C-alpha cells in the first residue's frame, strides 16, 4: 500500500486528478447508504497519492484505516488521537499545539472526538481548524464527519464559533492548499453557506424531501435543465448501497452515476465489529509516526546533539589557509580540509589588515561552507542596500528590508522579492541554504523564519571592489565577496 498514485481511483469507471485534494467535497446520504464507507475510499486514495489527511471523527470509526479490509493485516499509517483506539490522547486545551505538530511532522491522523463533551469538541475544532488554516502550506485534506453537527444550519450559542471556523476552512482553505470533505446524513440541516461552497457533490441514497431540497439548492446552481434536475432528484431514492451521483461541474463531471470501489481498510462500525473477533483485530504499528509527531510536539530534534564543537565542516570540497600563522593540523583546528579546490572566496573583516590574526582565506567549491554550532551576525554596509553584488547579499537585503512578517518566508517568496528589485536570482538557492545553516533563517513548519536581530546595517565606507557582507562568528570575521 505504499506505491504513490497520480490519480485517485474511486470507482472502476471514474478516476480524479490528484489536485482535487485541494477541493471541497460533500458526501450526503441517509444512514446506512455508505457515505462514510465511500468517503474512506477517497481518503485511502489520497494517502496512496502521498497527500496527508486529517479526519475529525465524532463517530469513533475512522481508526479502521489502520487495519486491513477483513480486520487482518496492515492498513495505513494513521495516528489516532483520542477515543477507544487512541495512539495518543486528544487534549482540547492543546489543540493549536497539536495542529502545529501534525503539520510539522506531516503525518496523517484521526481526531476521534467521540468521547469529548460538546463544549470540549467546539473548543478543539475552533482552535485546531483556525491554526491549521493559518500555518498549512502543503497539500492536505480534512474529512469532517457529521458535518451537520459541526456546521449546523441554525447554530446555537457557542456553535457559531465552530461554524465560522469550518466556513473559513471551506471558503479559504484552498489558499493554504487545504481541501475538505463534509459528510452528513442530514443534508437539510448542514449549513447552506458551507454546503453550497462544495466543488464536488457526492449524493448517495436520499429519501426525505427536505434532504432532496438541500441537495437541489447546490445542484440548481450548476444545472440549467430543470426538467432533468427534477428527474435526477427523484432517482436518488433508487440508489443502492455504495452507489452515488457525483457532480463536479468545474472538473467536467456532469452528474455521473458510479459505484464506489470497495475499501482496502476496515470499516469499523459497531455493526461490522460484531462480525469479527475484536481481540484479533490488530491495527498496524505507527510507532515511527508517533515518534515524529512527539518530536514536533515537544520541540525536540530526532537526533540527540552532543556537546557543541567549534568547527567548520564542508560537505563538498574546501580548504582553509591562515594568512599569518603556520598551517595547523585539521583536527587540531577543528576544520576539515579536503583537497581538489574548485572556487575561491575571501573572508576578510572590515578591520582585515595584513597581519590580523583573524584574517582567513577560504578556498571552496559550492555548496558553501556549512557552519555548525555558531551564531553568526551579518553586517550590511549601507551602500550595499541599493546594489548588492552577490546572491547572498541580495537575499539578505530583501529579508532585512521587507516590511511584512518575518516568519512566513519561502524560497519562492525570497526569489520573487529579488526579482521585484530587477536583480538576477541565480545562486539564491545556495545563499538561502547558507543562511539556514547559519540559523539566520530557521525552518518552522513549511516556512522560514528570518532572525532580524542577526543582521545589522552599518555606516562603513566600502571600496567598490570589496563590497560585501561582514560575517562575525566568534573567531571568524569576514566579508563575503
Image (cartoon, helix red, strand yellow):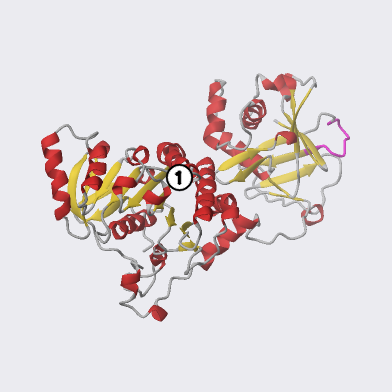
How many numbered marks does the figure carry?
1
Decide if residue 177 is in sight here.
no
* Front in this rendered view, residue 479 or 11: 11
Q: Quadrant of residue 221?
A: top left
Lateral position of residue 309 relative to residue 35, left or right: right
> In front here: 355 or 382?
382
Query: Is the residue 337 above or below the residue 431 in the image?
Result: below
Which residue is pictured at 31% across the width and 65% down the height? 264
Which residue lies at the image location 24% right of the left edge and 46% below the top edge? 210
Q: Name the quadrant of the C terminus.
A: top right
Crowding near pointer 1: few (<14 within 10 Å), some, many (20+)? Answer: few
Identify whether 22 is placed above or below 58.
Answer: above
Q: Is residue 41 magenta?
A: no
Residue 222 location (% of width, % of height): 23, 35
Q: Nearer the viewer, residue 222 or 452?
A: 222
Q: Could you tell me residue 394's position as x and y percent?
A: 63, 28
Disc 1 is placed on an element classified as loop
Q: Residue at (36%, 37%) from the top-left corner?
A: 193
Residue 115 visible in this rendered orientation of the protein: yes
**Magenta stretch encompasses residue 356:** yes
Where does the image place residue 440, in percent across and percent down from the top left? 68, 39
- Residue 474 placement, left or right of 344: right
Query: Where is the N terminus found, in terms of image quarters?
Result: bottom left
Q: Residue at x 87, y 39 (%)?
A: 357
Q: How would you classify the magenta stretch by its main secondary structure?
A: loop
Q: Position of residue 330 (x, y in %)?
A: 77, 53
**Residue 6 vs residue 394: left or right?**
left
Residue occupied by mark 1: 156
Q: Which residues are magenta?
A: 352-360
Amino acid at each position: 500500500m505504499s506505491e504513490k498514485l497520480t490519480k485517485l481511483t474511486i470507482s472502476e469507471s471514474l478516476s480524479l486528478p490528484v489536485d482535487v485534494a485541494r477541493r471541497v467535497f460533500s458526501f450526503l446520504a441517509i444512514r446506512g447508504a455508505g457515505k462514510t464507507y465511500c468517503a474512506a475510499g477517497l481518503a485511502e486514495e489520497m494517502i496512496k497519492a502521498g497527500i496527508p489527511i486529517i479526519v475529525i471523527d465524532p463517530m469513533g470509526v475512522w481508526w479502521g484505516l489502520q487495519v486491513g479490509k477483513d480486520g487482518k493485516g496492515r492498513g495505513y499509517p494513521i495516528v489516532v488521537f483520542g477515543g477507544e483506539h487512541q495512539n495518543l490522547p486528544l487534549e482540547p486545551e492543546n489543540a493549536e499545539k497539536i495542529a502545529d505538530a501534525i503539520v510539522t511532522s506531516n503525518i496523517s491522523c484521526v481526531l476521534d472526538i467521540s468521547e469529548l463533551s460538546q463544549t470540549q469538541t467546539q473548543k478543539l475544532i475552533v482552535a485546531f481548524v483556525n491554526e491549521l488554516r493559518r500555518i498549512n502550506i502543503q497539500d492536505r485534506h480534512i474529512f469532517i464527519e457529521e458535518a451537520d453537527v459541526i456546521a449546523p444550519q441554525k447554530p446555537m450559542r457557542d456553535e457559531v464559533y465552530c461554524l465560522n471556523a469550518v466556513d473559513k476552512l471551506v471558503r479559504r482553505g484552498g489558499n493554504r492548499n487545504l481541501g475538505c470533505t463534509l459528510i452528513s446524513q442530514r443534508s437539510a440541516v448542514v449549513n447552506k453557506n458551507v454546503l453550497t461552497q462544495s466543488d464536488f457533490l457526492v449524493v448517495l441514497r436520499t429519501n426525505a424531501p427536505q434532504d432532496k431540497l438541500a441537495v437541489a439548492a447546490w445542484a440548481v446552481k450548476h444545472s440549467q435543465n430543470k426538467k432533468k434536475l427534477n428527474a435526477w432528484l427523484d432517482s436518488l431514492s433508487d440508489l443502492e448501497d455504495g452507489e452515488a451521483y457525483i457532480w463536479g461541474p468545474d472538473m467536467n463531471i456532469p452528474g455521473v452515476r458510479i459505484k464506489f470501489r470497495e475499501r482496502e481498510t476496515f470499516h469499523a462500525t459497531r455493526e461490522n465489529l460484531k462480525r469479527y473477533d475484536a481481540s484479533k483485530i490488530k491495527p498496524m504499528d505507527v510507532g515511527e509516526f508517533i515518534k515524529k509527531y512527539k518530536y514536533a510536539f515537544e520541540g525536540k530534534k530526532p537526533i540527540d546533539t552532543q556537546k557543541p564543537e567549534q568547527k567548520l565542516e564542508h560537505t563538498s570540497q574546501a580548504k582553509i589557509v591562515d594568512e599569518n600563522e603556520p598551517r595547523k593540523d585539521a583536527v587540531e583546528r577543528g576544520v576539515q580540509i579536503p583537497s581538489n579546490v574548485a572556487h575561491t572566496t575571501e573572508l576578510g573583516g572590515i578591520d582585515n589588515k595584513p597581519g590580523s590574526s583573524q584574517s582567513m582565506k577560504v578556498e571552496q567549491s559550492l555548496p558553501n561552507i556549512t557552519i555548525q554550532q555558531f551564531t553568526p551576525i551579518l553586517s550590511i554596509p549601507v551602500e550595499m542596500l541599493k546594489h548588492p553584488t552577490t546572491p547572498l547579499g541580495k537575499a539578505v537585503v530583501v529579508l532585512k528590508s521587507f516590511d511584512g512578517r518575518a516568519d512566513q518566508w519561502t524560497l519562492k517568496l525570497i526569489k520573487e522579492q529579488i526579482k521585484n528589485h530587477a536583480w538576477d536570482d541565480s545562486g539564491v538557492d545556495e545563499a538561502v541554504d547558507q543562511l539556514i545553516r547559519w540559523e539566520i533563517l530557521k525552518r518552522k513548519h513549511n516556512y522560514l523564519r528570518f532572525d532580524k536581530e542577526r543582521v545589522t546595517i552599518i555606516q562603513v565606507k566600502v571600496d567598490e571592489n570589496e563590497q560585501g557582507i561582514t560575517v562575525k562568528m566568534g573567531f571568524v570575521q569576514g566579508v563575503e565577496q
